[in-house]
Amino acid sequence: MLSLWEESQFWRLFINAIGAISIILGIWLIYKLTKSFVVGKNQKRALNKEYITVKQIPYIFSGLVQIAFEVFVPQSIEINILDQNEKVKLPVFNKEFGAGLHVENINVSDLKNEKLNLEIKTDKQRILRTIEIKN
């Protein structure tokens, strides 16, 4: 290899070109990875603000139950209780909420004992939780 380096101009240029290309590709790759990490993190933060965060929901509903959720941007939220076929059994509410933590009461005393689904729906997400009614 050393003899090729000393004797041939072509091999010297060829090996130097490979080194230069490797350095350029390495710099480009580091730039792209850094950019995607920073941009991805910013996009994720912006996207998370469009969704609501539902606090822990009890599995067993009896009588009057409170659910809590946090809204980051004002939006309309609809909460329904669905049967196993996802048909609305009890519409709870559909109203506009401002940013902040909200606690709402759900009265399930009129429902019989069975397993149902709680649906929390906004324009950008739909959350389903299985609940059991015990009155």
Image: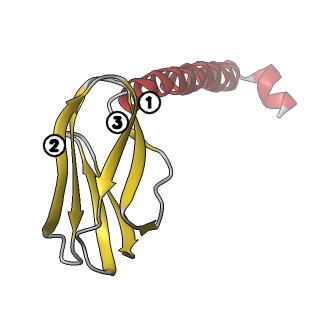
**Tag shown at residue 51:** 3
Q: Nearer the viewer, mark 1 or mark 2?
A: 2
- Picture layout, residue 125 above or below residue 50: below
Lateral position of residue 75 relative to residue 71, left or right: left
The image position of residue 69, as x and y in percent, is 40, 40
Residue at x 29% of width, y 57% of height: 107
Asked if labels 2 and 1 touch by Cβ distance under 8 angstroms, the answer is no
Q: Position of residue 132 (x, y in %)?
A: 39, 74
Which amino acid type is shown beneath numbered disc 3? Tyr
Position in image of residue 120 (x %, y %): 28, 51
**What residue is at 32 percent from the left and 81 percent from the top?**
113
Marked residue nearer the N-terminal end (3 or 2): 3
User: Where residue 94 is drawn, which disc sits there?
Assistant: 2
Q: Secondary structure at mark 1?
A: helix
Q: Which quadrant: the C terminus?
A: bottom left
x, y percent for residue 127: 32, 54
SS class of the residue under badge 3?
A: loop
Residue at the spot of label 1: 44
Q: Which mark is residue 61?
A: none
